[in-house]
Image (cartoon, rainbow, N blue to C red):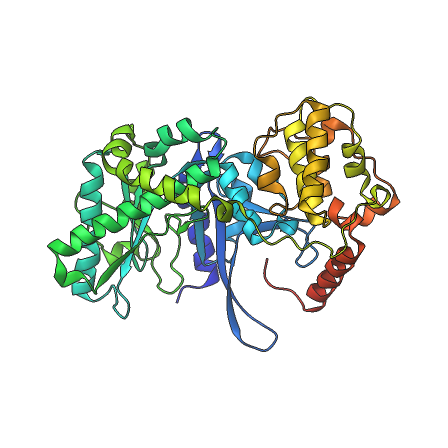
């Protein structure tokens, strides 16, 4: 079994590090990372942890918790320190996602944040041995290689330069360069229903995977139990990154030839030989215009997926159940100063859309009845002469109001990415604001006490590896 020192030396090898950082970088955008580690808890039980975040300060007293930017060298070095396995997202994010503090963003809200900040996507298929089978069995290995070859051949009909394969340690990743989907992002990313459009894309990609899988098993029924492709492209899909060490086997993730798929276990052993490192320098550098791929292969599934997703829109937009007080807090004197000042603002130019989103979220979290909340929301819309689109529907009791830190941040990024209200000059902190993390907890005292109690219990429970 590899030692921590051997694994760290592998990740800090300049050729390994430069390749991972290069592929994690896409123009001004990048892939987020995650790190896998094992630890022993207080009861002596071995546990595993996949951690998406870096933070300043030691857990549980972190001052911030933010996503790992694998294109940023300091983040990379921090992440690979004594971590066996490194993952990256198939999503390519804009830089703003790395400014978010995830201490006050739960898992469901995090998914929507990921969708909002996604600027490109690498279509991926994770091919593994079937349940109960082992990749080291020659027949199973042949089944995995054959299915990967089939997908590769099908995609290269329209994308001759965009298909990339990796031996994942336990199977094969088939990946299509993110530039192949660029025209879809250019067409729909500014669409009002972008979250629906993005989910429809994932659904269509998964349907394509399943359709080709069925075609393959018709041709090769002898492989049906021995191999399986995962059709689970989604808003936070992760693969092990190139050169990552496998969780169980002492293999690294290495490139395979898309024209002649064959796994050489010896080449994946550590330390990687010079040939593998040299051949990987140009991996994931070429791509095609994917318009024909979208039109010829994906389009039949996109239409069906979009209609299905539109019907499920409320579910997609719903982040989590917003726990609101039983008795609505309608007395403005009890409201956080920023929300009180926002509600009384006579006019609002730049930033009005994100201000309305914050206000709708706040009303939902302090228990205002929906008709009453809509009336108050419409009052602002009319007074400001604002465009409201679907903001109330999408944010009332579906989105948590932004934290105070994010409301005050000096970032006027437009809606829906931005949440700063700094330009409106409505944040006038009083003494209580100093100990409150969001306008909701200023106004809802009971909720704030519950939050503090939860954090105290977490701190008393001890720490886990960062």
Residue at figure coordinates x 43%, y 44% from the top left: 311
Residue at horizontal 78 percent and vertical 24 percent from the top:
346
Q: Residue 461 at what x, y percent from top left?
A: 68, 69
427 in relation to 347, above or below: below
In this view, the residue in front, 458 or 245, is 458
Q: Is residue 320 visible?
A: yes
Residue 258 visible? The answer is no
| Residue with the most extreme bottom position | 43
State whether residue 84 is above or below residue 42: above
Q: Is residue 316 above or below residue 116?
A: below
- From the image, which quarter does the N terminus lie in? bottom left
Front-most of 274 and 35?
35
Q: Is residue 433 left or right of residue 133?
A: right
Percent x, y for residue 198?
Answer: 42, 39
Q: Position of residue 164 (x, y in %)?
A: 28, 42
- Please tell me which residue is depicted at 40% across the width and 27% down the height of the picture: 187
Residue 237 versus residue 190: which sits nearer the camera? 190
> On the image, which quarter does residue 391 sit in?
top right
* Residue 113: percent from left, percent from top: 55, 42
Which of the pair 370/253 is nearer the observer? 370
């Amino acid at each position: 079994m590899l030692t921590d020192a051997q694994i760290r030396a592998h990740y800090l090898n300049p050729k390994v590090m430069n390749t991972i950082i290069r592929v994690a970088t896409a123009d001004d955008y990048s892939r987020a990372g995650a790190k896998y580690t094992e630890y022993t808890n207080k009861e002596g039980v071995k546990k595993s942890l996949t951690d998406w975040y870096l933070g300043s300060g030691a857990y549980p007293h972190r001052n911030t918790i933010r996503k790992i930017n694998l294109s940023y060298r300091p983040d990379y070095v921090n992440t690979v320190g004594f971590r066996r396995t490194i993952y990256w997202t198939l999503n390519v994010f804009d830089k703003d996602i790395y400014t978010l503090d995830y201490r006050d963003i739960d898992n469901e809200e995090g998914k929507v944040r990921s969708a909002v900040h996604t600027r490109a996507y690498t279509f991926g298929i994770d091919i593994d041995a079937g349940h109960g089978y082992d990749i080291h069995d020659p027949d199973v290995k042949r089944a995995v290689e054959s299915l990967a070859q089939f997908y590769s051949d099908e995609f290269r009909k329209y994308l001759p330069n965009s298909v990339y394969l990796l031996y994942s340690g336990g199977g094969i990743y088939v990946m299509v360069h993110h530039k192949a989907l660029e025209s879809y992002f250019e067409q729909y990313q500014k669409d009002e229903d972008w979250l629906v459009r993005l989910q429809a894309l994932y659904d269509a990609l998964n349907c394509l995977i399943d359709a080709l899988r069925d075609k393959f098993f018709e041709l090769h029924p002898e492989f049906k139990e021995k191999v399986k492709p995962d059709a689970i492209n989604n808003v936070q899909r992760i693969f092990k990154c190139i050169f990552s060490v496998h969780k169980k086997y002492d293999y690294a993730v290495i490139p395979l030839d898309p024209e002649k798929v064959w796994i050489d276990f010896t080449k994946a052993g550590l330390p990687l030989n010079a040939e593998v490192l040299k051949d990987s320098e140009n991996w994931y550098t070429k791509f095609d215009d994917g318009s024909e791929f979208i039109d010829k292969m994906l389009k039949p599934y996109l239409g069906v997926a979009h209609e299905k997703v539109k019907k499920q829109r409320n579910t997609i937009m719903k982040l989590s159940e917003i726990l609101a007080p039983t008795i609505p807090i309608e007395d403005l004197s009890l409201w956080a100063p920023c929300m009180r000042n926002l509600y009384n603002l006579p006019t609002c130019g730049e930033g009005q859309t994100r201000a309305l989103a914050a206000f709708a979220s706040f009303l939902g979290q302090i228990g205002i009845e929906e008709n009453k909340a809509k009336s108050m929301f419409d009052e602002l819309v009319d007074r400001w002469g604002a465009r409201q689109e679907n903001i109330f529907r999408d944010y009332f009791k579906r989105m948590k109001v932004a934290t105070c830190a994010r409301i005050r941040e000096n970032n006027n990024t437009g809606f829906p990415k931005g949440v700063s209200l700094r330009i409106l000059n409505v944040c006038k902190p009083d003494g209580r604001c100093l100990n409150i993390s969001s306008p909701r907890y200023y106004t809802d005292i009971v909720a704030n006490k519950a939050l503090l109690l939860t954090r105290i219990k977490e701190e008393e429970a001890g720490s886990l590896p960062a």
